[in-house]
Image (spheres, grey):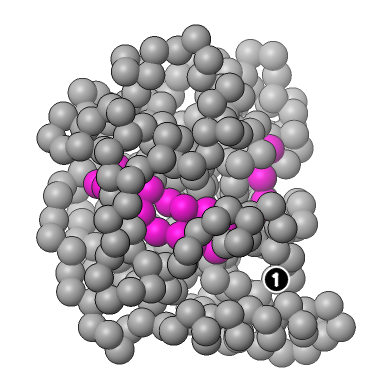
Amino acid sequence: MLIRRPPSIPPSELTPPALYKRRKFLRAALAAPLALAAPAIAPAKAQAAATPDYAPNPAFTMEARGYGTFTPKEKMAGYNNFYELGTDKRDPAANSHFYRARPWRVAVSGEVAEPLDLDVDDLLKLAPLEERVYRLRCVEAWSMVIPWMGFSLSALVKKAQPTGKAKFVEFITFNPDELFPENSNSSLPWPYVEGLRMDEAMHPLAMLVFGVYGELLPTQCGAPVRLVAPWKYGFKSGKALVAIRFLEKQPATTWNVLQPGEYGFYANVNPNVSHPRWSQASERAIGGGFLPERRKTDMFNGYAEEVAGLYSGMDLQKQF
Ligand SMILES: Nc1nc2c(c(=O)[nH]1)N[C@H]1C(S)=C(S)[C@@H](COP(=O)(O)O)O[C@H]1N2
Ligand SMILES: [Mo]
């Protein structure tokens, strides 16, 4: 991952937190009795489907996790890593017309009793949709606090019924050379591939995400479906997934293959293990203020209580 100076964000792009809260309240109040009425917020542009119903998970609200402020939607949707749509942080939003996120199919295959080939709008009905506020911590030492909408990846894993041989799960993004050949770039070898160990994929924190801020995912955020594994650096959270494969062996993952000395397979957020070119001890927290705040990075991005047990007995300096 390259280091770049953050683009300056004009103040007009900021959504006051009060406005977001009010919209969210409206949606919550309207969702149940008026399920068939027009949605309170217009669905994101270029999204054919209506915003599905969802409920906040009380264990993952701003208050429950002790987060002071969330990242305004406009900041989150204007500062992205999604190399398929370009390498500058502003490219993914500017190039979001490169593909349509619907209709869209996701294939589940490999070491499973039940291979699946699902339309994304059926996939999102697999389990009740919840909103969870997670901090996403990029390996480039910035973080955002974002309300994600989706459900635990484990729901899909259970549905696919992995065989005893399945030890890893591989997440594959569309290939831009095929989806939009005229606009494809060669910044990475495509497709983008990420992976988790089976026990990580089964951990309830690992989330299959279909929306943010109470709406379906904008294209630049990885529409129509992505992973979010919040205790890991952001690059583990593959966007715009077309295939999920269960494997016996550890998959070859994009950044790990390119620069194994810099990006480990595990990529657990760890303030004690520096990137060879910069410290990971602190991060720029991109929040509601005009300037990002500097904050100390937490072990496992603040989710140590939940996930540390997955790594007992491992040398996290070596298996980073
Ligand atoms: N397919 C794909 N997924 C990807 C990336 C990418 O370039 N391509 N970038 C990753 C990185 S480095 C980060 S930090 C997060 C950023 O997610 P966000 O833009 O929604 O905040 O997406 C991850 N998922
Ligand atoms: Mo990242």
Q: Secondary structure at mark 1?
A: loop
Tell whether 30 sits left or right of 264.
Answer: right
Tell whether 196 sits left or right of 80.
Answer: right
How far across and how far down the image is residue 250, in percent? Answer: 45, 19
Instruction: Please name the amino acid that badge 1 sits on.
Output: Pro
Mark 1 Cα shell of 10 Å, populated few (<14), some (14-19), many (≥20) = many
From this viewpoint, which residue is outermost toward the top?
313
Q: Is 157 part of what is drawn in magenta?
A: no
Tell whether 119 sits left or right of 79.
Answer: right
Magenta segment, principal secondary structure?
strand
Measuring 49% from the left and 15% from the top, which residue is drawn there? 249
Q: Which residues are magenta?
A: 132-154
Q: Quadrant of the C terminus?
A: top left
Q: Is residue 270 above or below residue 67?
A: above
Q: Which residue in the protein does label 1 denote?
A: 52
Measuring 40% from the left and 59% from the top, which residue is drawn there? 144
Measuring 47% from the left and 64% from the top, which residue is drawn there? 68
Q: Quadrant of the N terminus?
A: top left
Measuring 71% from the left and 89% from the top, which residue is drawn there? 38
Q: Is residue 143 above or below residue 23?
A: above
- Residues 199 and 248: in front is 199
Q: Is residue 181 above or below residue 23?
A: above
The answer to whether one can see residue 50 in this image is yes
